[in-house]
Amino acid sequence: FKSAAFWLRGRWLPTFRYVCAGSPCGEVLLSGRMRHFRAVREAFPDDAFLREEGIESYSGSPVFDRAGSPLGVIGLLHDGELDVERASSLLERHILRVAAELEHLRTEIDLRRAQERLAFLTGHVPALLWTADRAGRLTFVSGRELQRVGVEPERLLGTTVGDSAHDAIWGLTAMDAHERAIEGQSLSYRERWRGEWYDVSVGPIRESDSQIVGTIGAALNATERVGEEARRASERERDRVLEQWESLSLMAGQIAHDFNNLLMGVMGNAGVALMRIPERHNARECVEQIEKAASRAAELTQQLMVCAGTVSMTTRACSVRSLADASVVRVRERLIGEYEVHVDAAEGLTVDVDPSQIETLLQNLLANAVQAIDQKGVVTLCANHLDVDSSVLARTLFENDCKPGSCVRLSVRDGGAGIPLGVRRRIFEPFFSTRAGHRGLGLSAVLGIARGHRAAIDIRDGDPGTIVDVYLSTESASDAERVVEASPSTDSTSPRVLVVDDEEMVRVVAELLLDGVGFAVESAPGGAEALEILRRGAPRVDVVLLDLTMPEMDGRQTFLAMREAGFETPVVLTSGYLESEVWGRFRADGVSGFIQKPYRVDDLVRVLRQAIGTP
């Protein structure tokens, strides 16, 4: 038993507990009716309270709730003899009131216990839970997220959702959601709170008559989910850009072959015309402009191929400091302005790269940085050695199959306005530029060169400005095969060249160019015809100018067939593809040289004479 109220000899006794069994109250509960006991101490000798207080008489009645379940006992005790009739009347007058009080007390106890259980449960829910009245005052706040961010729920109780004093916690979006929920809407939204992202759901609280009396809300931490969604979006964007590059690489290869063959006709015929036109002829300047325009078109084709990342790099150990200094010199030649470029690179830092390509990469990054500061201010180029793991590379803008481990990081920093997040990947797309009048190929070339070197690229905020990082693996490249050099020719007659190309225009132009500078020329439209000419043996062929891309029997097949047939004639390959892409695949086979289409007559003569060993 637990006493609810006890008045004894003019004072209220504090609440206490005692054993029901062996007591008069226990007998009342067991009987379920009013009971009276005289000489009660003798009747219940084990009841210490009766004995200690000297109680002689007892009258008691059970108290029931509205459902008929016992709530307790109301009793009268006396150290003398009780008037049973009077005691019964007194108990009957108070029993209903006591029953109501005990039932209310039990309800309060049950409610308090339920609230404690609810607080315990909600306090361990991995979320933030709250209720608010119609005015937006918080009436309940709980959830493990409060512990996560270090906020006591008592601090928030009674405050208003969206109160300016708690904007850092709730944000204005919460008040908007509360007002819409009061109107009967249930809604969900995402909100940032104390550096964490939350998925929030808010709805109305209705009474039994459907009247809305407040709102209830729950917020689940979505920070990891937001990060994962951002990562997936980044991967999708990266894949989209890389798919563009794959398509561009195919397009660039076809452009290089077809367009450069056309340019070969333009440049070659212009070269022949210049050899035949007198120095002071009024048409000579026009032909020179034609040759110059064709040369510019050829450079643009080469740049497209670099942008597409289809070039295989010919690498060697290079001083990073030397590459940086050379790049700065070229940028200063190209861009005039009130700017400075600071270089911070250790003298002993080296990396295996294609030097011309990395210089192009640095020049484009530096030029972009100088333009970002309107050619006024400071641009910094830093190079440092560091070890990077796969997690660091995975967070870069373009990982480009860069291997984790020892790397050299090239960083170009400007103090400009910065690059918005949504544009960072797009700046590497071909023909994308935020500046009017620009082709947008500079940074495309950066990505193409980085892909060829398997170098990762990232962009960071410079606060102010932007930092572009390029991670180059320091893993040593394989030694390049040595070029097979021809022995000097002792033949004093005009060298004879066999031109092998499936394009008639190219053959005609080559014949005209070479004939004009004293070479004897013979031509063949394919590999089979070239082998037949070599088998004739007379007149002897001193060097073969062999096109790489031909139908039926391509340049490589023709070259191998020549060697299998025993012909050791020097071979110079020609193609619209870049030299670095072709040369790395053929130099081990013993090819004597390479010249890229379209070519000038002086470049062609130099390569052919080097191949046959004549000055």
Image (cartoon, grey):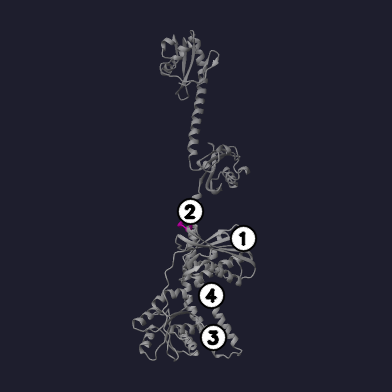
Helix, strand or loop for disc 1: loop
Dot 4 corresponds to which residue? Answer: 300
- Alpha-carbon span between mark 1 and mark 4: 30 Å
Question: Looking at the image, which is closer to me, 555 or 403?
Answer: 403
Q: Residue at x 53, y 16 (%)?
A: 7
- Residue type of the residue flagged with mark 1: Ala
Task: Say whether marks 2 and 4 touch (CB < 8 Å).
Answer: no
Question: Looking at the image, which is closer to me, 145 or 349?
Answer: 349
Vertical placement of 23 versus 615: above or below?
above
- Residue type of the residue flagged with mark 4: Leu
- Alpha-carbon span between mark 3 and mark 1: 47 Å
- Residue type of the residue flagged with mark 2: Glu
Circle 2: is it few (<14), some (14-19), or many (20+) Cα within 10 Å? few
Dot 2 corresponds to which residue? Answer: 228
N-term mark: 2 or 4: 2
Q: Residue at x 51, y 74 (%)?
A: 302
Vertical placement of 35 versus 367: above or below?
above
N-term mark: 3 or 1: 3
Mark seen at residue 270: 3
* Residue 390 located within the stretch drawn in magenta: yes
